[in-house]
Every structure is written in structure tokens, then in C-alpha cells.
Image (spheres, rainbow, N blue to C red):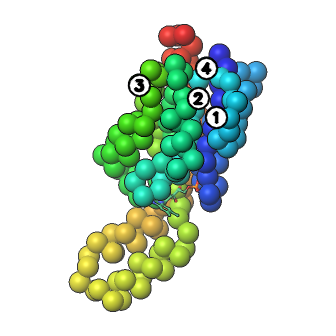
């Protein structure tokens, strides 16, 4: 079973998860671990993205659209959430762009820290709109995200990847 780990990461969160996944899988089976590119030949694709405006990145969307008759497993980091329902919504949007002839595995999500400029903007907005309680929630979420991906996230990602590959091998 040839495995490719294809990811897009701007601030390293998704890259950190991708590298943990890569190390957890049999090195003889991993044929690629890197950015989206043409000519990657694998049976099982673990495709990772940062979350951009409620969707995967454009690069990952374009890559996913090229996959046919493969096992595809999606993983992502997201600034918001930590909530299963938010992750479900994100996956619904992403899975809609994956061609239906692929075998789609359950996804993996974890939180990923955001740039400090995002927090600064929330603080500015809170000063201008003290009545907006959602801003305090956003700041709290931002602060929680600062610790992620953490060791537990990486271990969960490794376990998820091993399970995906084992299942793909069983079916294949
Ligand atoms: C322009 C931009 C848009 C973002 N949109 C979302 C979003 O809609 N939902 C979310 O949960 N996180 C969002 N984030 C947060 C990132 O997805 C998150 O920090 C992620 O872990 C970054 O991954 P990376 O370090 O691999 O680039 C956004 C970040 C940026 C910079």
C-alpha cells in the first residue's frame, strides 16, 4: 500500500501534525510527504489543510478534486472549535469537493494556534463594542488555541492515521 501525506500549512500547525503522522506510518509505505504536487502516485492519500474561512485551503481543494479511485483521509487544524459539531460542518464542506469514486475515511481535526494579530483585532473590537459578548468568547477561544497542536493532538493524529491505513489495507 503506497501512502502519500499531502498538506498545506502556512504557520506550521498542520505541518507539525503531518510530520507526526508521517513518522507513525511504516516508512517503506510512505512514498510522499509534502505540499500538493502533480505526479504523486499512491493508493492512500492523507490530505491535510489549515482552515481558511470555513473551508480547506484553495491549494488543498484543487488537489482533492484531482483524486480518483483512491482511499482519501482528510485531516485539518482549525483556529476555532474544539467542538465536534464545528468540525463536522467543516468536513461536510470539504468532503463535497472530493470526487465520489474515492473511498473516504473519517477525518481528523484539532485546534491550531492563530497569529497574535487576530487577538489584537478582537481586543480593538471589544474596546469599540463592549456590548458584543461574542468577542470575549472569541478571545477565550484564541487563548485556548495557543497551546495547540499539543502532544495529545499529535498522538491522536498518529493513532488516527494508523487506523486509516489499517482499514485501507483490510479493504484493499
Ligand atoms: C486568513 C485566515 C482564515 C482563517 N479562517 C479560519 C476559519 O474559518 N475557521 C477556523 O477554525 N480557523 C481559521 N483560521 C485559523 C487557522 O486555520 C489555524 O490557525 C490553523 O491551525 C493554521 O494552520 P497552519 O499553521 O498549518 O497554517 C484562519 C486563519 C487565517 C490566517
Q: Which residue is mark 4?
A: 43
Q: In which image quadrant can residue 19 be found? A: top right
Q: Residues within 10 Å of mark 3 (few under 14, many from 20)?
A: few
Measure the C-alpha gap from mark 1 to mark 2: 6 Å
First of labels 3, 1 by sequence position: 1
The dot on residue 5 is: 1
Q: Residues within 10 Å of mark 2 (few under 14, many from 20)?
A: many
First of labels 1, 2 by sequence position: 1
First of labels 4, 3 by sequence position: 4
Q: Quadrant of the N terminus?
A: top right
Residue 91 position, x and y percent, is: 39, 41
- Report if residue 128 is visible in the image: yes
Measure the C-alpha gap from mark 3 to mark 1: 20 Å
Q: Which residue is mark 3?
A: 100
Q: Left or right of 143: which side holds 86? A: left
Residue 161 position, x and y percent, is: 56, 30
> Which is in the foreground here, disc 4 or disc 3?
3
> Which is in the foreground here, disc 3 or disc 1?
3
Q: Which residue is mark 2?
A: 45
The residue depicted at 44 percent of the width and 28 percent of the height is 99
The residue depicted at 33 percent of the width and 75 percent of the height is 135
Amino acid at each position: 500500500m503506497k501512502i502519500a501525506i499531502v498538506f498545506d500549512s502556512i504557520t506550521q500547525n498542520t505541518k507539525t501534525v503531518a510530520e507526526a503522522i508521517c513518522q507513525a506510518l511504516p516508512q517503506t509505505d510512505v512514498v510522499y510527504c509534502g505540499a500538493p504536487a502533480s505526479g504523486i502516485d499512491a493508493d492512500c492519500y492523507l490530505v491535510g489543510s489549515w482552515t481558511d474561512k470555513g473551508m480547506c485551503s484553495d491549494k488543498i481543494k484543487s488537489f482533492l478534486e484531482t483524486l480518483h479511485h483512491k482511499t482519501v483521509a482528510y485531516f485539518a487544524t482549525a483556529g476555532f472549535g474544539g467542538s465536534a459539531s464545528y468540525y463536522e460542518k467543516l468536513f461536510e464542506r470539504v468532503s463535497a469537493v472530493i470526487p465520489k469514486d474515492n473511498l473516504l475515511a473519517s477525518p481528523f481535526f484539532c485546534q491550531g494556534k492563530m497569529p497574535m494579530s487576530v487577538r489584537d483585532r478582537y481586543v480593538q473590537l471589544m474596546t469599540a463594542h463592549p456590548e458584543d459578548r461574542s468577542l470575549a468568547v472569541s478571545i477565550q477561544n484564541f487563548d485556548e488555541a495557543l497551546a495547540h497542536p499539543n502532544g495529545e493532538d499529535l498522538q491522536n493524529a498518529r493513532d488516527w492515521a494508523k487506523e486509516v491505513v489499517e482499514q485501507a489495507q483490510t479493504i484493499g
